[in-house]
Amino acid sequence: MPTLTLTLPRPHSAQQRVIREQARFNVLACGRRWGKTRLGIDRLIHPALQGQPVAFFAPTYKMMSDVWRELYNTVQPVTQRVSSQEHRLELITGGIIDMWSLDTPDAPRGRKYQRVVIDEAAMVPHLQEAWQASIRPTLTDFEGDAWFTSTPKGMNFFRTVWQYGQDPARSEWASWQMPTTANPFIKAGEVEAARQE
């Protein structure tokens, strides 16, 4: 059987720090061009390559579809089966990547995952309900982990889970807050110009 090579983007220094410091439940409150979604994709690919089932959640179908294309293109060389209708990738390693829109929070009921990523979590209208009733139970069988990534957006459940990560009594949680300028590929001058406008 021929050897396949998969080229993955290398996480930038701030992303590497988060990966080093990760806990079971991780919350990233970062600027718009920090690289949250790209980090989420990276966090899913690794366990999937090791044969694990993982899932990506987005607030809307459109947001999920944009990431679906990027993820599909990234893992295409090691993909065995694709279901565009179900937004499901089955890898040659046995790993599975499911993608869900949280337009309907009950969708993942009955599934089992090693890791989940909830992208732009602050934009999910019923995030607490989706997490507690639907997503968190999918992690039970594998004692899986989770990543909440978002740009902050007011006082909501995303803010609550970010505070969990700051609480030393909640050892399973970790959280970070970083500006867009922590991404070395984004020029600080461009961020400042946008801020002034």
Image (cartoon, rainbow, N blue to C red):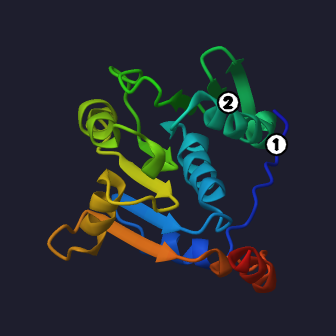
Q: Secondary structure at mark 1?
A: loop
User: Can residue 52 be seen by looking at this rendering?
Assistant: no
Q: Residue at x 77, y 43 (%)?
A: 74
Q: Residue furthest left?
A: 169
User: Which quadrant would the N terminus be assigned to in this image?
Assistant: top right
- Residue 29 or residue 99, whichever sits in front: 29
Labelled disc at residue 92: 2
Q: Residue at x 66, y 56 (%)?
A: 38
Q: Amino acid at mark 2?
A: Ile
Q: Residue at x 30, y 59 (%)?
A: 161
- Left or right, 18 with reference to 90: left
| Distance from Cα at disc 2 to Cα at disc 1 | 10 Å
Above-or-below relation of 91 to 40: above
- Residue 21 or residue 117, whichever sits in front: 117
Q: Secondary structure at mark 2?
A: loop
Q: Which residue is mark 1?
A: 4
Q: Amino acid at mark 1?
A: Leu
> Which of the 4 image quadrants contains residue 132?
top left
